[in-house]
Image (spheres, rainbow, N blue to C red):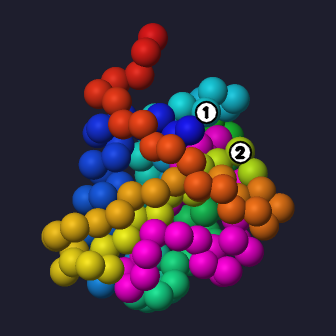
Amino acid sequence: MLTITRALYDQIVKHSRADHPDEACGVVAGPVGTGRPERFIPMLNAARSPTFYEFDSADLLKLYREMDDRDEEPVIVYHSHTATEAYPSRTDISYANEPQAHYVLVSTADSDGAGPFQFRSFTIVDGVVTEEEVKVVEEYDA
């Protein structure tokens, strides 16, 4: 199960809507080994495409160095789908290289970027996609 604060949930949705009709992408980092998403890091979709996302390689390298310096890891890797449901595509599955991460997809397909959306989370390990419950909380327990 993914437990996420309302503030982080809202930031992911806002980014997905703002980049519509292109796919949005980003990471939510957290302390290594905790599984707790804490730091929202929106990324630029280097592909600038409504059907595909790609992290800029230089930005991604910078992000991983920064997370390493802060003893963080990617807890959530997110992106949006602008024309399809919030479910990992074959390409998404092939790019999923963080087995501990939650892969969040937001679909803005049924809207103009401001209306209804889907918010779903998955684990992707060795090509196996498993949907998981998303629990939105106001704040994390201490």
Residue at the farthest right position: 126
Name the spot of residue 137 as percent of width and height, x first.
34, 30
Taking the image as shown, residue 19 lies to the left or right of residue 31, namely left
Name the spot of residue 130 as percent of width and height, x first.
66, 56
Distance from the alpha carbon under mark 2 to that under mark 1: 8 Å
**Residue 42 falls inside the magenta stretch:** no
Q: How many marks?
A: 2
Contact, mark 2 vs mark 1 (Cβ under 8 Å): yes
Amino acid type at mark 1: Gly
Q: Nearer the viewer, residue 70 or 102?
A: 102
Is residue 105 positioned above or below 37 on the image?
A: below
Q: Quadrant of the C terminus?
A: top left
Report the magenta residues as a range: 73-98
Residue at the farthest top position: 142
Q: Residue at x 43, y 75 (%)?
A: 85
Q: Residue at x 64, y 48 (%)?
A: 101
Is residue 8 positioned above or below 77 on the image?
A: above
Q: Which residue is mark 2?
A: 100
- Tell me if residue 35 can be seen: yes
How crowded pointer 1 is (Cα within 10 Å; few <14, some 14-19, many 20+) is rated as: some
**Residue 97 falls inside the magenta stretch:** yes
Amino acid type at mark 2: Gln
Name the spot of residue 11 as percent of width and height, x first.
30, 51
Q: Secondary structure at mark 2?
A: loop
